[in-house]
Image (spheres, helix red, strand yellow):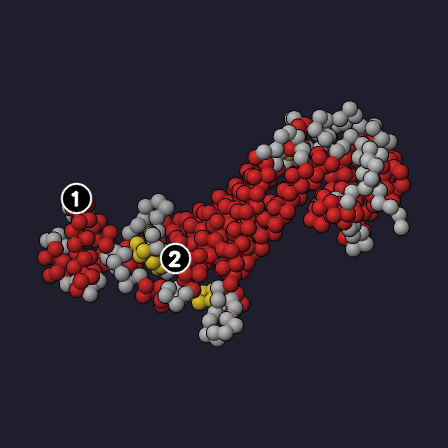
Amino acid sequence: MTAKQTWSQRFESALHPAIARFNASITFDIELLEYDITGSQAHAKMLGHSQIISPEEAEQLVTGLEQVRQEYRQGKFQPGIDAEDVHFAVEKRLTEIVGDVGKKLHTARSRNDQVGTDTRLYLREQIQQIRQHLREFQHVLLDLAEKNIETLIPGYTHLQRAQPLSLAHHLLAYFQMAQRDWERLGDVYKRVNICPLGSGALAGTTFPIDRKYTAQLLNFDSIYANSLDGVSDRDFAIEFLAAASTIMVHLSRLSEEVILWACEEFRFIHLKDSCATGSSIMPQKKNPDVPELVRGKTGRVFGHLQSMLVIMKGLPLAYNKDLQEDKEAIFDSVNTVKSCLQAMTILLREGMEFRQERLAAAVTEDFANATDVADYLAARGVPFREAYNIVGKVVKTSIYAGKLLKDLTLEEWQQVHPSFDSDIYEAISPRQVVAARNSYGGTGFEQVRQAIASAHSQILQG
């Protein structure tokens, strides 16, 4: 059996097997393999372009790397723990294919700027995919909104009945959250798309490299101006994880509402069999697994953001092995956000339906129209604060009498204040309560129609 190789001639003995396993990252950074190949091909082209190696050698490296890519895609190249990391794995296989010229690939490059480049190549592609998932999520919200402009739903503050809303208006609130998420990721993308390649280990290189040429080949917008910053910066990862966490906040809030809407106490929605499961012991139950899982998975993305902040807070310049821990946080957050967006999109599109009769009844069984009574008096010259107190007393006496405001007789209204007339009943009807809130951004039906048109424009402009 061949003895395990030492790290280099600087070392006299090999790593302890347990330490070798502890040190290795190949089990997770294999995710970067194709990005590593893409970055290495650009680096090889630059070496040839800059006459650091011959054009023929550069072509051999590029062709050999492409063979490694194809072998990986076909399942013929599957590096194990002995490879330590994806970078060594690729370089070793490349050298087996092209011979000693493969050993020239690492000229003027360190694993420090190499891994930074790979991670950025990966993350900018994933950001674009997540933004596409957000767009699909927004389209479903818009479709639902267009179908439910004049569907009413109770609005809540402090989880207490507040004022009735257009259901479309409620759904469009989540559209706007997703729009900010989409824009936020676009802003993060700008700082992801800066190339660290050429920074070397920390101080640059003695070779006459052309960093702008490499960045251009890889479609980066710019290059790092400081080599120390280039290899040690993970601000882009923190920003991405913060943006991912915010997406999960929004999905979790919607999930909480769906869970409430599905329960017997609300009964605002019906969960379809395609997006719900049952109980192992209670045959009558239908559980909202999708929103519950989204709500639960939110915590893991939050945790990855926190771990990244803690990793970075005490690191001196430049690269430190601690930074190996960024990848699992990024990979898992990407996968979690994408799967949760996809699941919630499916749930909204085909996994639930609103109970129209229940919603119509729900907006008539409370005092959510009390503010409109105060507005009614204010419009007739009664100072609002005085009107507010008058209506408060009316609500209190109505509760004691077991009545709703709509049940009061006109005589009872006029005993409260002489300004009340028969038009009070129309003013406090749920549909009129909603329609009357026609201020910009409000829940009035005309405003909601304009908001839907504006939302379509936002998507088209993106």
Q: Residue at x 48, y 64 (%)?
A: 288
- Crowding at dot 2, Cα within 10 Å, few <14 / some 14-19 / many 20+, comes out as many
**348 relative to 308, above or below:** below
Image coords of residue 90 (percent x, y): 79, 44
Residue 236 found in image quarter: top right
**Nearest to the observer: residue 419 or residue 61:** 61
**144 relative to 6, above or below:** below
Question: Type of residue at label 2?
Answer: Leu
The residue labelled by disc 2 is 167
Q: Residue at x 20, y 61 (%)?
A: 399
The residue labelled by disc 1 is 383
Q: Residue at x 54, y 47 (%)?
A: 303
Q: Secondary structure at mark 1?
A: loop
**Nearest to the observer: residue 182 or residue 121:** 121
- Crowding at dot 1, Cα within 10 Å, few <14 / some 14-19 / many 20+, comes out as few
Image coords of residue 43 (percent x, y): 77, 35
Sequence order check, earlier mark of 1 and 2: 2
Q: CA distance from mark 1 to mark 2?
A: 32 Å
Left or right: residue 327 compared with residue 19: left
Left or right: residue 96 compared with residue 377: right
Q: Secondary structure at mark 2?
A: helix
Question: Type of residue at label 1?
Answer: Pro
Image coords of residue 52 (percent x, y): 83, 28
